[in-house]
Structures are given as structure tokens and as C-alpha cells.
Image: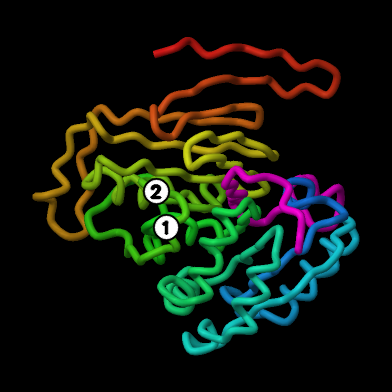
């Protein structure tokens, strides 16, 4: 039986375009959390339009970084996600990595299947579940499967699909700054104020433990949008019109930040310098 590095459910959610060629810092840290040289990694390249190439690329990088074993699981149909051999591969994994591509393809093929159930079991027993780009969006209950880009939230600018539900009460978007996705995330969260919106920049990750504690790593930031006390006309705005949102709370969290998703507040910040780490404790709310 594999040795799981932790019994704490851990998600490793990357905003896409992470470094795979140089230091590969984010992937290296994912592998460390997954058991390092004892790690057994399952790569799911299903979202991609170039599944063979993507599977081979991640196999190469995880092998180069020292993983004991890398297995590709790539269902082509929903029926494939019922295959006992596919489920068995997940049941032996210490880390699971879902690639980028089409969120809709993941939504159609994995949630609500034995493969989706196996990912949940892996998460609960301490395997690290990671996703990049589309693979990041699918970890939440609901995900933005398509939508307009830009900074202005507009009525009906986004389409929502079901995710895996590994992260409760959160909608994750990715390539956030690079593709100007502020508006589409706001257009989803404003009319659903019980949800938190999380936008993750490229080459940036949020590591979530116990479903609530976020640690930010990488070269960009994680954007957290809280509309729980905001005023909006989302219920009345016509299709395509700009949506009124007033009083939203925005957190922009660079590497070194920790954040509580349940209490919706910053808990600490460690400024990242090459030769100096300065810890600044966040004021308690």
C-alpha cells in the first residue's frame, strides 16, 4: 500500500501556465506534498485537446523531479470513467494532477462517476489533488465553463457548470490577470453572495488544507472576491448590460499570504525576499 504523506485533505490549485522547464517550483512543491520520491502520481490530461502530448510532458517533468511512479488516466467517454482499472489507478495514488484545456470536457466526463468518486476518496485519505487551468476550475462545486473576458461584470456573461465539489462554497477561475477575467467572476459571485470568487494568476497556486486554509505560492497573486455585503442589481439587469456591484470586498494575495476561506479574512503575510523573510501578522477581525 502507498504511504500517504498526510491525512489532511489538500488541494493544489494552479492558475495555469506553470513553469515545467526551469525550476518548476510549483510542480516540485506539489510532488513534495505528494510524497517526494515515494510519490505515485496519476495525471489526468482529459481536458486538453492534445492529451498524448500533455500526458507525456507531465510524465517527463514528474519523473525528472523524482516521482516513484507516474500513471496516465484519460477517459474518452463517460463510460470510461466507470472502468474498474481507472478507479484502481486512483485508489493507489498519493497525488492526482488534472491538466488544463476545456472545463466542459471535464464536467461532462468525471463528476458523478466512479472516477469522480475515486478522486474524492483520494482527497479524503490524504492524497494531494492538483489541477491547473481547467483542472483548477473543476475542484469547486460550480465552475465557469465559458464566459466573456474584460473588467466589467455583465449580465449573463458567464456559463456555470458542475465541478467535482472538492472545495465547498467557492468558484475558481484561472489565467486571471493575464486574461482579464475580473468581470466574469464578479458577474457570477454578485448574484450568489454566499459563494466566494477566487481568481488565480498564471504560474501561481493556492494550496488549500482542510477546505479552508489557503497558502499562496508562485509568481503572481490569488484574487478573492467577497460579495456577501454588496449591493447589486443582478436580479434586474437586462442581458448583456453592466451589472451594478457596490460594497464588494476584494483581497489580492501574493505569495506568502495565508487566508481563511470560512472566516473570509487574511490570517498572515510573509513577504517574499531572496535574503529576508519578514512576517507580518494580520490583524484579527
The residue depicted at 36 percent of the width and 65 percent of the height is 162
SS assignment at label 1? loop
Q: Quadrant of residue 54?
A: bottom right
The residue depicted at 43 percent of the width and 34 percent of the height is 261
Residue that numbered label 2 is attached to:
168
| In contact (CB < 8 Å): disc 1 and disc 2 | yes
Q: Quadrant of residue 40?
A: bottom right
Identify the residue at the far front of this view.
1
Relative height, residue 200 to residue 17 (above, below): above
User: Measured from the top left, where is residue 103 in percent x and y?
Assistant: 48, 68
Please tell me which residue lies in front, 79 or 194: 79
SS assignment at label 2? strand
Q: Using residue 265 as the reference point, say whether residue 245 is left or right of it.
A: left
The part of the chain drawn in magenta is 1-29
Q: Is residue 12 magenta?
A: yes
Identify the residue at the far left of this view.
236
The residue depicted at 54 percent of the width and 38 percent of the height is 222
User: Measured from the top left, where is residue 111 in percent x and y?
Assistant: 44, 71
Residue that numbered label 1 is attached to:
165
Q: Is residue 21 magenta?
A: yes
Amino acid at each position: 500500500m502507498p504511504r500517504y504523506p498526510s491525512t489532511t485533505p489538500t488541494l493544489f490549485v494552479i492558475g495555469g501556465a506553470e513553469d515545467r522547464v526551469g525550476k518548476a517550483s510549483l510542480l516540485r512543491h506539489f510532488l513534495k506534498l505528494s510524497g517526494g520520491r515515494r510519490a505515485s502520481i496519476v495525471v489526468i490530461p482529459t481536458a486538453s485537446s492534445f492529451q498524448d502530448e500533455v500526458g507525456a510532458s507531465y510524465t517527463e517533468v514528474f519523473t525528472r523531479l523524482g516521482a516513484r511512479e507516474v500513471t496516465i488516466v484519460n477517459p474518452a467517454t463517460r463510460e470510461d470513467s466507470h472502468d474498474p482499472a481507472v478507479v484502481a489507478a486512483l485508489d493507489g495514488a498519493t497525488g492526482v494532477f488534472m491538466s488544463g484545456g476545456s472545463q466542459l470536457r471535464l464536467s461532462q466526463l468525471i463528476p458523478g462517476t466512479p472516477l469522480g468518486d475515486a478522486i474524492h476518496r483520494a482527497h479524503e485519505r490524504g492524497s494531494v489533488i492538483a489541477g491547473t487551468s481547467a483542472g483548477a476550475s473543476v475542484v469547486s462545486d460550480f465552475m465557469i465553463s465559458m464566459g466573456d473576458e474584460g473588467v466589467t461584470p455583465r449580465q449573463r456573461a458567464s456559463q456555470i457548470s458542475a465541478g467535482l465539489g472538492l472545495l465547498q462554497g467557492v468558484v475558481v477561475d484561472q489565467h486571471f490577470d493575464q486574461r482579464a477575467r475580473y468581470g466574469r467572476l464578479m458577474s457570477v459571485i454578485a448574484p450568489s453572495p454566499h459563494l466566494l470568487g477566487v481568481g488565480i494568476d498564471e504560474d501561481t497556486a493556492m494550496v488549500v488544507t482542510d477546505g479552508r486554509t489557503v497558502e499562496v505560492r508562485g509568481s503572481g497573486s490569488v484574487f478573492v472576491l467577497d460579495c456577501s455585503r454588496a449591493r447589486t442589481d443582478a436580479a434586474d439587469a437586462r442581458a448583456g448590460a453592466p451589472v451594478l456591484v457596490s460594497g464588494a470586498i476584494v483581497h489580492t494575495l501574493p505569495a506568502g499570504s495565508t487566508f481563511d476561506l470560512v472566516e473570509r479574512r487574511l490570517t498572515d503575510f510573509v513577504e517574499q525576499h531572496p535574503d529576508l523573510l519578514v512576517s507580518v501578522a494580520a490583524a484579527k477581525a
